Image: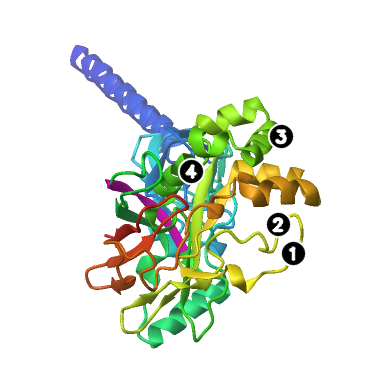
Amino acid sequence: MNINLSMMRILKTLMCVFFISVLVTSCSDDTDEQFQGDVTVTLVSKGSKEGVEGEAKDFVFDVFLSKSFNQEIDLTFSLKDIDAFPNLLSVSKVQIQKNETQGTLTISSLEKADIDNILSDVKNFEITLNSFSGISNQITLASVEVITIKPEEGFLPLTDEQRELVEHYKTQGIDLTPWIGKIPVEVTVKTGANGLFSPFEVEQNLTYTGTTHITLSENATREKPLLKMTKNAFGLAEYLQYVFRNETILNVDYWVNNPSPTAVLNHLGMVRVDKWKAKEYSFDVAVDNILVNSDNTITYVYENGAFDNPHKEGDPVGLQDDSDWFITAVNFEYDFELWNELLEEIKGDLTFYDENILTGGSIHPDFYIGYSRIDQDDWFETNWVAATGSYDNASKEMNFKFNTDHSNSGDYDIVTVKYKVQ
């Protein structure tokens, strides 16, 4: 009897253990596999959410699931409206491991050449949850996150028509794609000696490095593949500003104290004159109509109004172009902030223009720079060179050599320019 009682107690204990085991398993299934409620996903950024088109960058988010499950869960994210902007951003897939609640989402801005850029203004892309697998529950995003991509500063993307022209030129044996964008440049300027005053009295060898913004010219046609250097043309913005400042605001003996410049400076006022002296006004230079030929030469020197042409369209007196002012030289187009201000203020004031601007008080750079033609030797000194331009897509180099000069030169300056792309 005692033996049977002991056996019954053992059986009861085994049944209790079995019951508890079943209960624990049941609870576990309810937590991991049998939960049928909605699940939410929260995105938390781990850094900046802004980038620039064409620059490689990763935008990383922690992905948090509101509960864990006893199996892997795959999440597929996308970006709203991204289909209209191919090759702009890529989105990784996310996997939440078994019994975990956290994963990582990476959205990448793709590196590409400037010519392939398409954005002209800022675009915001909302992150969306496209699909998921691994569980049958409904999964929804609990947070709204946005990636912002800005257009590349200072460089407008090509239009569809311009892209078609670039492709057409390829059929003619001319590939412009390496030369459109922000192109690194190295420049050497050997200045002429014997100028009227310092620093133009002695020869100098000046070097500059930087970037030139190059795009397809608005004047390009199917027959003429024309480029335009829209910023820091030929890498010369700094040098040409140096020449201009020494011809004008820094030239106390021969310019500042003369009647016409004095009248202009008085009009500008001391505050603006001091800012000019301190180099606080923007200064840039462009060159248009750079013809790329199929024989790997480049034509860029034409007869044009490169120097001292008060009759150019846009001057305040509204006179017409006068071909007598034209010379054959590189046609630098200047953008000097202080001149733009003055031009707006004296618009229509023919008296001020005639008595002060045309008589030596102009603060437009091409009143002083580009004094002589460069297709032949007008100085009869030592620095004249025949202008050359060439490109080689195999070595990815573009080279130029040409002359320039200015009002108080003693000879030509020799400019040597080298563009090299990776």
- Magenta segment, principal secondary structure? strand
Q: Are marks 4 and 2 in contact (CB under 8 Å)?
A: no
Badge 2: residue crowd in 10 Å (few <14, some 14–19, many ≥20): some
- Which residue in the structure is indicated by mark 4? 247
Q: Nearer the viewer, mark 3 or mark 2?
A: 3
Three-letter amino acid code of the residue under disc 2: Asp
Please identify the quadrant where the C terminus is shown. Answer: bottom left
* The stretch drawn in magenta includes residue 199: no
Q: From what the image shows, is residue 369 above or below residue 163? A: above
Measured along the vertical axis of the image, is residue 318 above or below residue 201? Answer: below
Type of amino acid under label 1: Leu
What colour scheme governs how the chains and residues are painted in the rendered image of this protein?
A: rainbow
What are the residue bounds of the magenta stretch? 203-214
Of residues 198 and 129, the one drawn nearer to the viewer in this rendering: 198
Q: Secondary structure at mark 1?
A: loop
Q: CA distance from mark 4 to mark 1?
A: 26 Å
Are the two marked residues, 1 and 3, in contact with CB atoms closer than 8 angstroms? no
- The residue carrying mark 1 is 319
Judging by the rendered image, the residue that carries numbered circle 2 is: 315
